[in-house]
């Protein structure tokens, strides 16, 4: 009976040890998969040319990708906690505010172009924003991706200005222009 108890204890302990070892292996595999996934997304964010922001529902910046240094001339630490709207040009403010409000309703996505203040000047950005809904279906956070479109926008403005000058010249000319 003493031997039976020892054998029974050994079998039970061996079974428990096997389950513990399997549980540890499973946990280590899950941790490795998580590390690999985090590394993949970290690389995407760190090497992205566009600006990636995570915003609170009220527009406060919670996260800014490292590209903020090149695009806006400040660090993530300097910008986190400020409101995105505080960076928007006064003439673009209303349009941006309307676009951000549209995130409250399906499809919870908006796009807009606006000037943003950098450390040196105003730059044009094309923004693509997607709402992250909470468990109740309400706006929880916003993922915003901004692309610097300053060069394109300035070229468009110069082209428009040139067309207006040509049109004015053509309209004021006494001769017909073909």
Image (tube, helix red, strand yellow):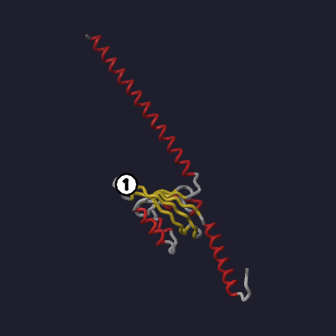
Q: Position of residue 86 (x, y in %)?
A: 48, 69
**Left or right of 141, for residue 170:** right
Measured along the vertical axis of the image, is residue 109 above or below residue 121? above
Measured along the vertical axis of the image, is residue 165 above or below residue 87? below
Q: Residue at (56%, 51%) from the top-left corner? A: 46
Question: The N terminus is located in which quarter?
Answer: top left
Number of residues whose C-alpha sits closer than 10 Å to that of mark 1, classed few (under 14), some (14–19) or many (20 or more): few
Q: Residue furthest bottom?
A: 174
In front here: 3 or 164? 164
Measured along the vertical axis of the image, is residue 85 above or below residue 1? below
Q: Position of residue 118 (x, y in %)?
A: 56, 67
Measured along the vertical axis of the image, is residue 23 above or below residue 49? above
Question: The C terminus is located in which quarter?
Answer: bottom right
Q: To which quarter of the image does residue 69 belong? A: bottom right
Q: Position of residue 65 (x, y in %)?
A: 53, 55
In front here: 43 or 172? 172
**Left or right of 65, for residue 174:** right
Q: Position of residue 5 (x, y in %)?
A: 28, 14
Q: Residue at (46%, 58%) from the top-left corner? A: 130
Q: Which residue is mark 1?
A: 134
Q: Residue furthest left?
A: 1
Q: Residue at (32%, 14%) from the top-left corner? A: 7
């Amino acid at each position: 009976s003493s031997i039976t108890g020892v054998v029974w204890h050994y079998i039970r302990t061996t079974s428990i040890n096997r389950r513990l070892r399997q549980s540890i292996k499973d946990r280590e595999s899950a941790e490795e998969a998580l590390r690999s996934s985090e590394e993949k997304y970290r690389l995407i964010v760190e090497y992205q040319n566009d600006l990636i922001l995570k915003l609170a529902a009220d527009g406060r910046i919670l996260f800014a990708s490292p590209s903020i240094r090149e695009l806006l001339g400040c660090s993530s630490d300097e910008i986190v906690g400020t409101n995105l709207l505080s960076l928007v040009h006064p003439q673009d403010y209303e349009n941006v505010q309307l676009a951000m409000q549209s995130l409250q309703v399906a499809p919870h996505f908006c796009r807009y172009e606006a000037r943003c203040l950098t450390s040196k000047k105003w730059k044009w950005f094309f923004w693509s924003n997607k709402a992250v809904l909470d468990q109740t279906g309400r706006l929880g956070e916003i993922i915003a991706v901004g692309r610097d479109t300053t060069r394109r926008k300035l070229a468009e403005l110069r082209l428009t200005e040139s067309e207006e000058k040509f049109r004015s010249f053509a309209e004021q000319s006494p001769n017909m222009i073909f």
